[in-house]
Image (tube, rainbow, N blue to C red):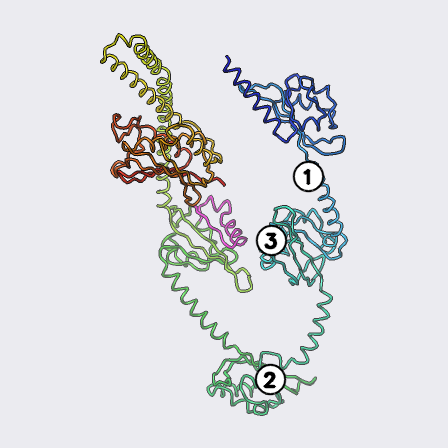
Amino acid sequence: MNQRNHELHRINSDLHNVLNGVQMCIVVLGNDLCIRRFTPLAEKVLNLVPTDAGRPITNIKPNIDFPGLEQFIVDAIDQVRTQQTEVQDKDGRWFSLRALPYRTMDNKIDGAVLVLVDIDAVKRSGERIQAALDYAQSTLETVREPLLVLAADLRVESANRSYYTAFGTGPAETSGRFFYEINQGRWNIPRLRLLLQEILPKNTSFDDFEVMYESEHTGPRMLLLNARRVADASDKPGRILLAVEDITERRTVELLRESEQRYRTLADSLPQLVWTCEPDGPLDYTNDRWTEFTGRPREKLLGNQWRETMHPVDREETYVRWIEALKGTVPYDLEYRLRRHDGEYRWFKVRAVPLRTKTGEITRWFGTSTDIDDHKQAERLLEESEHWLRLIMQSVKDFALFTMDVAGLINSWNPGAEAMFGFKTEEVLGQPGAIIFTPEDRENGAQEKELITAQREGCCVDERWHQRKDGTRLFLSGTMRVIRDEAGELRGFTKVARDITEARRQQADLKEARDSLELMVAERTAQLQDTVQQLEAFSYSVSHDLRAPLRAMLGFAEALQDDCGNQLSKDGKGYASRIIAAAHRLDRLINDILLYSRTARSSFHLQPVDLGKVVTDALHEQPAFQPPKAEIELIHPLPPVMGHEPSIMQCVVNLLSNAVKFVPKGRTPKIRIFTELHDEAVRLIIEDNGVGIAPEDIGRIFRLFERLHPASTFEGTGIGLTIVRKAVERMGGEVGVSSDPGKGSRFWMQLKRAS
């Protein structure tokens, strides 16, 4: 009873010191709302004095303005749920008030705990932030230029009145939506989206991004977009401020000026070779491009001299066509080759139109010669490419490859598709792609959904059943992609499909095997749980049933030695001493077995542990660790680790006990304790000068009941290192040992480093 009173007194003292040391306003109340304890800070905030302990809190006039305090506390007790609100004291300071149910050790509700936290600075800061936001919003509304505020994901957080007016929209169609979706998706410009997406992560900005915008409300408008990052005081990535400037009128003026200048220098600025000639054919003007291309001055081109630059093969046909054009009967539109200044001939598209009088008489010819040599080569390459594409489609046998037009009608069909579906090319050309779908998929519009998805996302990947010409089915993995031209216009679709029917069957078999395996695992888990329960029963038996007769045997043996020692012979005294020693060894063995059992099945809550403190405490635990019995060198620092402190202490004591025990007779134990860092882990190393371990024994040193030496040489139970291994593994770590027989060993345990 005295011990329990002492323990109760100590717990009460601990609680008193904890409450005095906490810099928070805390009041502990009973079910009758009488004050049990309170922290020093509560005296000031709630207007309490030490004599208020035992008085109902309803009789106290606290400094906070909260008439519903009594019901607030009663609700926390009755509803067994934390109540929380915000209150002010008489000076206007804000506090967060919480009432928590007071739970006893046996989980009964025995009152409430009242906690007040000063949040005045946070509250005032929030009010200032709101004022700043209101100020910023007012500023945005007064700016004439349309403005948008975008979140990190490019959703519109707000827009000013100028934006809504300029683009004929409102908050309902704008706020909360992606920027590139508003205004009927007219802002969905890939380059613009990329620039906006880079602003926050790369802290960039952009100016004068030009957009041609047109809608029924605005008509065609030329806009300049400017964007900047708006920093956030918190850790959030911030926002984007996007400004829109309408430069339509300014650009119109600029275009008029450019047009005037362009017409003044039209002849010399065109990339084509521009020329004019008299009604009967001789040239009377060429632009600068002629000279640049041919390398001949203008006076060497006028008249009929320009014909010298024409390819000899093309001269006759060109002359005939020119004579016919001069008669006014056929247009002058043909292709021929001209010699460049470096001697290379290039193809030109040549057109000329006559200027006629009202009577139809030709007064002058205006002509242009356009270099189409690159286009000619591109056409040739395109023909070769189409030829190779046809060869590729014909050579692919393992995949079905076909294309469709924008309406989803098949316009090409490779041999792989013929083999896979059984349709000949002539049977499917012009047919909808749904011809290979099952009836149920055709009915629910599966092909139309594929086309829509591919058109929206660029491709559509699916796995589904399809149907051959003969009605049999096969499971395919297919990919449909859109075909677009250089202008981005949709030209059709291409689809590649692979037969994975056999793979699907194998997956089904694999799933069946996996389900069977999961069932076996469940059964083995149940068996394991049953084994654990049996081990727990065994531990109880060891703890209670075996220890009772052991204590009796030890007690009677000691009584025999003490009370009848003089009457015993020398052998009898030896027998009694052996009984007592054996009983003590058995008791240590039972203790180690129970400790191992608890280590193997207890749940560990891992938290940062001061490794230096644990090792220091362990060194002071046993006399065997103190000089002159042992020389122990502790090398700092010992970084903190993540673990279970009592278990780490047990491991260190076990390793130190072995280090001082397994030493040759006459040798003083010398031990070094230090750590090494291994990536994100800390390795605690205990190095001794003991007997060491033979290489063939290292693999079994951590096994249960493994002893390398007889009890007559070194006493022990053979469980200590097993407890170390199990405890470290339960903490997510590793153990190990290296040894030099006759010179000593190096045991180590490695745990995750605490941040």
For residue 53, side relative to residue 139 (left or right): left
Q: Nearer the viewer, mark 2 or mark 3?
A: 3
Q: Position of residue 700 (x, y in %)?
A: 28, 34
Mark 2 neighbour density, 10 Å: few (under 14) some (14–19) many (20 or more): some
Point out the residue furthest to the front here: 628
Q: Secondary structure at mark 2?
A: helix
Residue situated in front as seen by the camera: 208 or 488: 208
Residues in magenta, as a range: 437-464
Q: Earlier in the sequence, mark 2 or mark 1?
A: 1
Indicate the position of residue 32 as horizontal and vertical percent values.
66, 16
Q: Which labelled disc corresponds to residue 311?
A: none
Task: Give yes or no for contact between labels 1 and 3 (Cβ–Cβ under 8 Å).
Answer: no
Q: Secondary structure at mark 3?
A: helix
| Disc 1, SS | helix
Residue 457 among those drawn in magenta: yes
* Residue at 61% in and 47% down: 236
Q: Give the Cα distance between marks 1 and 3.
A: 27 Å
- Is residue 100 visible in the rendered image? The answer is yes
Q: Which residue is mark 2?
A: 288
Residue tagged 3: 200
Q: Is residue 31 left or right of residue 576?
A: right
Mark 1 is surrounded, within 10 Å at the Cα level, by few (under 14), some (14 to 19) or many (20 or more) other residues, namely few
Q: Which residue is mark 1?
A: 122
Q: Are marks 2 and 3 in contact (CB under 8 Å)?
A: no
Q: Is residue 50 magenta?
A: no
How many discs appear?
Answer: 3
Residue kind at label 3, given as amino acid type:
Leu
